Image (cartoon, rainbow, N blue to C red):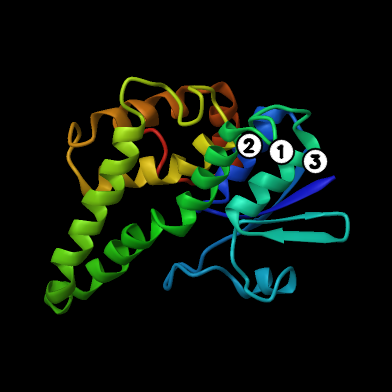
Amino acid sequence: MITVHHLNNSRSQRILWLLEELQVPYEIAFYYRDKETNLAPPELEAVHPLGKSPMISDGDLVVIESGAIIDYVIRKYGNGALAPEPGTSAHEIYLQWLHYGEGSAMLPLMLQMYTARLGAAAAPLAPRIKSELDRHLGYVNGALEGRDWLVNNTFSGADIQLSFVAEIAPLLYAEGDFPWLDQFRVRLQAREAYRVALEKGGRYDFGPQG
């Protein structure tokens, strides 16, 4: 059985959601951030040397990185669900989104979150970070214009992967700046499997507000 090594208030929430969507049995090993540093606890390093969440173990196999985990779970347990058929152009587009979510889109978001703690010292970087945020959030917003989901307008692992980008956006921009991304976030958070995973995963500050 899959074990999700789940850090509270982190991107591993997506993995719980994925498993709920596929109705794959799993266990949760809970880990909690240090209250002062907000860092993951050293216990995670016993599972993998990097000590980063998300990570899963499936028997003797440990898989890290959100995109790799989503890909592994869908290929092994999805029975054809949540991904286009391999060998099709839609599958290549799906893979692009799967890698883009953490490869390109998250960099300016993380830079913004980290440099925000520096106050005036971050001022020289602010215009470049803002430009990259506008570019990437605008790109995802444009890809969603007039459609519900990213690939063939069919819900997939790519949408789960990009969910964190959609959930971070309201912390940085006003509602309506990226309207298609706003609607995407609402659709994601309304899914029953998302709600079940939220109940099981514990504190998650980026979920539905109010």
Q: Which residue is mark 2?
A: 18
Residue furthest right as drawn: 59
In this image, 39 relative to 127: left or right? Answer: right
Q: Which residue is mark 3?
A: 76
In this image, 118 relative to 149: left or right? Answer: left
Q: Which residue is mark 1?
A: 74
Q: Which residue sits at x=59%, y=70%?
A: 41
Q: Amino acid at mark 2?
A: Leu
Q: Which residue sits at x=68%, y=76%?
A: 49
Q: Amino acid at mark 3?
A: Lys
Q: Residues within 10 Å of mark 1 (few under 14, many from 20)?
A: many
Q: Nearer the viewer, residue 112 or 144?
A: 144
Q: Residues within 10 Å of mark 3 (few under 14, many from 20)?
A: few
Tell me the quadrant of the picture where the C terminus can be found: top left
Q: Amino acid at mark 1?
A: Ile
Q: In what element is the residue under mark 3?
A: helix
Measured from the top left, where is residue 62 in percent x and y? 77, 61
Q: Nearer the viewer, residue 30 or 123?
A: 123
Who comes first in sequence, dot 1 or dot 2? Answer: 2
Q: CA distance from mark 3 to mark 1?
A: 6 Å
Q: Nearer the viewer, residue 99 or 54?
A: 99
Which label sits in the foreground, 1 or 2?
A: 1
Tell me the quadrant of the picture where the N terminus can be found: top right
Q: Are marks 1 and 2 in contact (CB under 8 Å)?
A: yes
Q: Are marks 3 and 1 in contact (CB under 8 Å)?
A: yes
Measured from the top left, where is residue 10 in percent x and y? 50, 53
Whether residue 45 appears in this view of the structure is yes
Image quarter for residue 115?
Answer: bottom left
